[in-house]
Amino acid sequence: MSIRQFGKLAVFGVVVLGVAITIVGTDIGVGVAKNIFTMSNTQEFGTIDPARGTDYTESYGMLNVYDPLVFPSPTGKIEPKLAKSWTISADGLSYTFELRQGAKFHDATELTAEDVKFSMERILALKDGYSWLWSGIVKEVTVDGPFKVTFHLSKVYAPFLSTLPWLFIVNKDVILAHKQPGDFGEFGDYGTNWLAVTTNEDAGSGPYTLMAWDRGREIVFERFLDYWGGWPHGDKHIDEAHSIFLQETATVKTMLRRGELTMVEHWRTYPDYQDMAKIPGVEVLTFLSPEEMSFKINTKRPPTDDIHIRRMLAWAFDYETVIQTLEPGSGPARGPIPASIPGHNPRVFQYHMDLDKARQELEQSKYYPDVPTITLVLPTGLENRRKMAVRFKEKLEPLGVKLDIHVEPWGRMTDLATTVETTPNIMVTSVSSNYPDADTYLNCMYHSRGSGTWMSTEWLQDPVVDQLIDQERTTLDPEERAHIMNVAQAVIVERCPDIFVYVMPLRVAIQDYLRGFTYRPVMSFYYYFYDWWFEK
Amino acid sequence: MSTRASHHQVTTGLNETRWMIIKDRLGRGWYKFRRNPISLVGGVMVLLCVLLAIFAPYVTPYPKHAGAFTDFQNAFQAPSKSHWLGTDALGCDVFTRIIFGSRISLMLTAVVLGISVPVGVFLGLISGYMGGKTETVIMRVTDVFLSLPALVMALAICAAFTPSIDKAMLAVASIWWTWHCRLVNGITRSIKTEEFVQASKVLGASPLRIIFKDILPNCASPVIVKITLDAGFVILVGAGLSFLGLGAQPPAEDLGTMISFGAKYLPERWWMTVFPSLAIFFIILGFNLLGDGLRDVLAVEEGV
């Protein structure tokens, strides 16, 4: 090649390079303007239909795409959202809400009282998702004006307001436009088939819209620029939120290290978060969750039908090691309700490890000295629970009490819980709040009507406890109600149906440029993308 | 009298000759085996594993760590002088746990093969010798079992019950007999037409006598080779079941369970996964080398 030829080629090359840089440059420019957020999930999204979803991923999907009337604050206080204000009738049977004007659905139409009425009727008709919170309680919803709506209850239900964060308002016109033939007369299928298959449409008014959905792998939400609440941090807000289904923690850590994940959800183990905290630019946030870990004891199956055996177990448990070594950052339990939940009784009795007292209780038992083997079942994959169970076995061995540990898949555990005969002596589970009120635990775990679920494997079925819970749910005076709930907790602790271990910490790992993570004591309400922004 | 005495002498003589033949065969087999370094290495590896497993409480540094033991302060220690292979999430010595874990894995092999080989061989002999409907029924059932992957079948059986190591053993055993049944069936079918079997028949020997005295000894070498090769696979299937949470229950751990728990802490705490994996690798390699060696030795025998 001659020098001239080389010169020509060089000039050509420089021109091509220049053009390429300009094109790529513009492209990068567009890319930089977008704030892309990615987070891992241990499970996939089943649905984000607000009348269907229940679990933690589904819940935050619904939360970001749809708005409720009211919203829980970081302390569990109920604050206005779509509802500006509300009044409660003196008999406690009607709740009237004044709606905010100017709230727009994603199709730019205005949200009105008709949509609120429709949303409640829809979830009650479908009998799915969180409908159990209101079925048999909400009798009728009336529209009193374009922005005024009243819920009429069939009986007094003290925690009603606390349950309303789960009522997500859907766009009535959009749902009916997509209805298909179904079981609900003029409403057809209530748009359920459409919401079950759509991957880029929704019927919400929330700060984010459903942008794309690759089922079993990833779901993407996009910022709704016309959100009625406005965007206080302007361009720093998240434009696209990607939730990726990633079970393997090793993969998650690698992606976090490479910056491919902005957040790791709360389901990994403590040592995992310790590892993640060591990655430069990664921060681990810890909060006390509304979830309490307990060893639920079947009070109807030998030998744990004997209260002395149950108390022996409670005295033999090594609470301190578990709280300090296995779950640092967790809070000590005191009775069945976490301290952060309104209605918690801070004065109930709490056991500590005392093997002498355990032995005394054991000797008082009708089964002593030949105590039948105690079976304990814990769910697969949860490391800390396995460690706790082995520690427990280690402590029971010198007392001559045999503990048989079984690790079972979660689906099988819920099956075992359905009858008193199949429920093992001990099940290791944790229960979280559905709404920020002590009633959520009392009612689901200890009332006889709740028997047969994984939350109520104590099979307590105690008439005194049942009566106290019924009273608490129908008492409107806050002080009187608090008193009844305190008594109920004291009675429950006296019956010793659980080893109350600790209030679980909630940890998330984030890249430190993510700001605004706000904890709220209701499941998944802390995964509210609207709270967050990037500070790069 | 005299005829009886002479008969006795003859049988003694026969027995002696037979014994000499066996001794000669054994000697030649041992010679072949010794000459084959690979099988020798395999044999030593298997023997080492078995001895370590039997004497686990005496050879491990922390035998207490095999039971319900926790020491969370010492959890996740990297390999060191006091813990050669590090410690696990409970603070237990990984080396101790591997030795005790291989005990469970070897036990699994022994129980599974102890149940499935006699059953499979017996059914194979019966079906091969009897033929006809008996054979059709037995062999079609075998085919059905063989068409399902062992691990999937064992999973299905385990999932129907409360998970435990006993159930896992039974589940694997309930499918493993089919391989031996098929093998022995084929051999029996070919042997039953041989002249010495026909001769026994003509002499009036009962079917049972023919099956066990004439046919069974001729199946021995392939079955033995298959057992040694199988041992490795059974360990692997057992480890697979345990990995999926259907094997040993806490605090007991077999090698598959150890890997399953350890995998959660990869890659930082690699010793919890890598060493149990190497242990499985070691045992299976040992059995396979031994099996290959035995095949060579016994194949030569058949040739003679």
Image: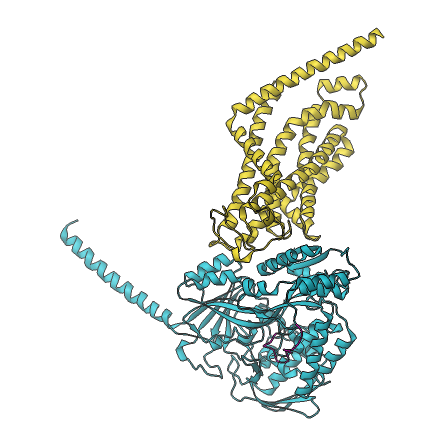
Chain colours: A cyan, B yellow
Give the residue drawn at x 56%, y 53%.
B261
In the depicted structure, whether residue B8 falls above or below residue A357: above
Q: Is residue B66 above or below residue A201?
A: above
Vertical order, A106 against B148 (above or below)? below
Taking the image as shown, residue A221 lies to the left or right of residue A490, namely: left
Of all residues, the one furthest to the top in this rendering is B2
Horizontal and vertical percent for residue B23?
64, 18
A348 part of magenta stretch: yes
Q: Which residues are magenta?
A: A338-349
Q: Residue at x 15, y 50 (%)?
A: A2
Query: Is residue A270 shown in magenta?
Result: no
Does any portion of residue B149 appear in the rendered image? no
Q: Main secondary structure of the magenta part?
A: loop
Percent position of residue B254, x then y: 60, 47
Front one among A18 and B186: B186
Going by the picture, which residue comes out furthest to the left? A3
Q: Which residue is rendered at x = 77% and y = 71% of the image?
A: A461
Quadrant position of the C terminus of chain A in the picture: bottom left
